[in-house]
Image: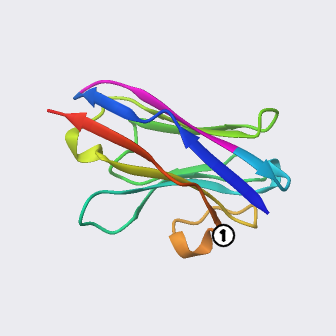
């Protein structure tokens, strides 16, 4: 069992930065692929970024590539999402998720564990 708790969301202006954190407990964190997803009002949940559990390989959605950085601290059992140059269209509830495998996927149903989400609002 893995428990995930996100933090770091908030209200910011266009162009600002935020860093989301996801504290994990339970199973061996370092061996799990982790991902960030987001869901805006009236829209489906979408993939944002993922990091593998084996070699820290990363993958990003085109919409955030170059602006967001996913990273992890296995010593702290924590996943991060550094978000720079934020835009109003980044407004959403952001969720961290963990697979039971070390390999990256962009498909939400292949992530087994989910956090409760943290709200990010970017004003124009």
107 relative to 30 in the view: left or right: left
Identify the colour scheme used: rainbow
Residue 43 coordinates in the image, percent (x, y)? 27, 66
Q: Residue at x 25, y 36 (%)?
A: 122
Is residue 100 visible to the viewer in this orientation of the structure? yes
The prevailing secondary structure element of the residues shown in magenta is strand
The vertical placement of 60 against 14, above or below, is: below
Q: Farthest residue in the left direction?
A: 124
* Percent of width and height locating residue 95: 50, 53
- Image quarter of the C terminus: top left
Range of magenta residues: 15-23
Task: Please check the rendered image and state whether residue 16 is part of the magenta-colored stretch, yes or no.
Answer: yes
- Helix, strand or loop at label 1? It is loop
Residue wearing tag 1: 112
Residue in front for this viewpoint, 115 or 97: 115
Residue 35 at what x, y percent from top left?
57, 54
- The residue that appears at 22% across and 29% down in the rendered structure is 14
């Amino acid at each position: 069992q893995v428990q995930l708790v996100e933090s770091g969301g908030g209200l910011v202006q266009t162009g600002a930065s935020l860093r989301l954190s996801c504290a994990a407990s339970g199973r061996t964190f370092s061996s799990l692929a982790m991902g960030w997803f987001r869901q805006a009002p009236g829209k489906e949940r979408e993939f944002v970024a993922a990091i593998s559990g084996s070699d820290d390989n990363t993958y990003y959605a085109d919409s955030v590539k170059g602006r967001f950085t996913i990273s992890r601290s296995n010593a702290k059992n924590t996943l991060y999402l550094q978000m720079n140059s934020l835009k109003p269209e980044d407004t959403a509830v952001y969720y961290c998720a963990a697979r039971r495998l070390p390999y990256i996927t962009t498909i939400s149903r292949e992530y087994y564990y989910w956090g409760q989400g943290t709200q990010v609002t970017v004003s124009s």
